[in-house]
Amino acid sequence: MKRRIVLLGPPASGKGTQAALIEDRLGIPTVSTGEALRNEKAAGTKLGEEADRYTSQGRLVPDSIAIQVVGRWLEHHGHEFVFDGFPRSISQAEGLAALLCADSQSLDVVCFLRTSEETIQRRVLNRMVCESCGRTVSVGLHVERASSPCPSCRASLVRRSDDTLETLARRMEEYRTKTEPLIDYYRGRGLLETVDSEETPEVVFEEISQILEVV
Ligand code: AMP
């Protein structure tokens, strides 16, 4: 089974949802750079404050920050991982290859979650995050209303500060210019698999399971 995995895709393509399913059902640990940065911000660290200057405007944080977050995570974890939202640029991909190579590792697969702009917009506008346990839910799918409590822990749901149409436009621009080139980069290395992420989380997970050669 493939156990060193990158999930690649535009904002709200379902990377976090699929990473959580892979972690829960296949036991492969996940690292989300976006979530790690939000946690740093919530903890009031210098790194979190610096990252927020970019994130709140829909911009990618500098490559050095993202690589630092992942490097730290890799130091404390084993040789299996799902990266949700990393790498997001060619230079991050090169940074990742160097980190893995230093540990005699390499990637097994990159799953590209193809999603239409219409779906991205709808998902961003429906997305809420639990302010206590951090679970991400979708209004209409997991909860009835934005004012509903978190289905996992009953705490309040809040909107991510970067989930506005204005910020999404910037995030999409960053995605197109910096992240999309990774599709060809990984295709050229024989690692890319494309998944139709318009489907429900269960259907997408089924497709990913086949790619990962889950037996
Ligand atoms: P996400 O939770 O994956 O949607 O990420 C939220 C935000 O965190 C992004 O819009 C970026 O500002 C920042 N971010 C997350 N991952 C990265 C990364 N690999 N490189 C640069 N910025 C990132």
Image (cartoon, helix red, strand yellow):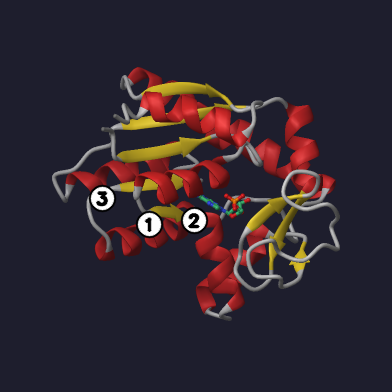
Q: Quadrant of the C terminus?
A: top left
Provide the secondary structure element on which disc 2 rests.
Answer: helix
**Residue drawn at 27 percent across, 66 percent down:** 76
User: Which is closer to the viewer, label 3 or label 2?
Assistant: 2
Which of the two discs, 2 and 1, labels the residue nearer the N terminus?
A: 2
Residues at discs 3 and 1 in contact (Cβ within 8 Å): yes
* Front position in the image: 125 or 92: 125
Position in image of residue 134 (x %, y %):
61, 65
Query: Residue at label 1?
Result: 70
Which of the two discs, 3 and 2, labels the residue nearer the N terminus?
A: 2
Q: Label 3, label 1: how many angstroms apart (C-alpha)?
A: 9 Å
Query: Residue at label 2?
Result: 33
Q: Label 2, label 1: how many angstroms apart (C-alpha)?
A: 7 Å
Residues at discs 2 and 1 in contact (Cβ within 8 Å): yes
Provide the secondary structure element on which disc 1 rests.
Answer: helix
Position in image of residue 98 (x %, y %):
25, 45
Q: Is residue 101 above or below residue 192?
A: below
Residue 182, visible in the rendered structure:
no
Q: Which amino acid does the dot numbered 1 rest on?
A: Val
Q: Which amino acid does the dot numbered 3 rest on?
A: Leu
Disc 1 within 8 angstroms of ligand 1 (CB):
yes
**Residue drawn at 46 percent across, 52 percent down:** 63
Callout 2 environment at 10 Å: few (<14), some (14 to 19), or many (20+)? many
Disc 3 within 8 angstroms of ligand 1 (CB):
no
Q: Is residue 146 above or below residue 87?
A: below
